[in-house]
Image (tube, helix red, strand yellow):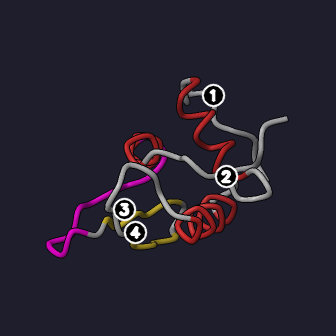
């Protein structure tokens, strides 16, 4: 796997590390996730409110949370998507 891209700012790196960390992190804000995804992936808001996220040829669809934080299943889905794209936890 590749390391974190150098073009990510500290907020993006922190969010990426929260997503990739085990056990699953809580209190990850959707706006921070969106900012990270807008930087590392192609994102499109669908007519049904979901977000299409394409990164390294892999596409996934995410449903925005009702509150400000993403749920545990979304963290797991994001982790799988980002790991398949070659991202790894910063030490």
Left or right, 15 with reference to 29:
right
Q: Secondary structure at mark 1?
A: loop
What residue is shown at x 31% (from left), y 62% (from top)? 66
Distance, label 4 to label 3, CA atoms, is 9 Å
x then y, percent, for residue 48: 18, 75
Q: Is residue 82 magenta?
A: no
The first of marks 1 and 2 along the sequence is 1
Q: Nearer the viewer, mark 4 or mark 3?
A: 3
Distance, label 1 to label 2, CA atoms, is 23 Å
Q: Are marks 3 and 2 in contact (CB under 8 Å)?
A: no
**Residue ID for mark 3:** 65
Label 4: how many residues lie within 10 Å, few (<14), some (14-19) or many (20+)? Answer: some
The numbered dot on residue 76 is none
Q: Is residue 41 magenta?
A: yes
Q: Which residues are magenta?
A: 39-49
Distance, label 3 to label 2, CA atoms, is 15 Å
Quarter-of-image position of residue 47: bottom left
Label 3: how many residues lie within 10 Å, few (<14), some (14-19) or many (20+)? Answer: few
Q: Nearer the viewer, mark 2 or mark 4?
A: 2
- Depth check: 37 or 17 in front? 17
What residue is shown at x 69% (from left), y 38% (from top)? 4
Q: The C terminus is located in which quarter?
A: top right
Q: Secondary structure at mark 2?
A: loop
**Residue ID for mark 4:** 62
**Residue ID for mark 2:** 25
The first of marks 3 and 2 along the sequence is 2
Q: The N terminus is located in which quarter?
A: bottom right
What residue is shown at x 58% (from left), y 40% (from top)? 15
**Residue ID for mark 1:** 6
The first of marks 2 and 4 along the sequence is 2
Q: Are marks 2 and 4 in contact (CB under 8 Å)?
A: no
């Amino acid at each position: 796997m590749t390391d974190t891209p150098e073009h990510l700012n500290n907020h993006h790196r922190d969010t990426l590390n929260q997503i990739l960390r085990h056990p699953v992190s809580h209190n990850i804000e959707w706006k921070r996730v969106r900012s990270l995804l807008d930087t590392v992936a192609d994102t499109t808001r669908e007519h049904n409110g979901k977000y299409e996220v394409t990164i390294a040829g892999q596409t996934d669809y995410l449903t925005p949370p009702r509150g400000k934080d993403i749920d545990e299943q979304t963290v797991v889905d994001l982790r799988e998507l980002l790991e398949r794209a070659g991202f790894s936890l910063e030490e």
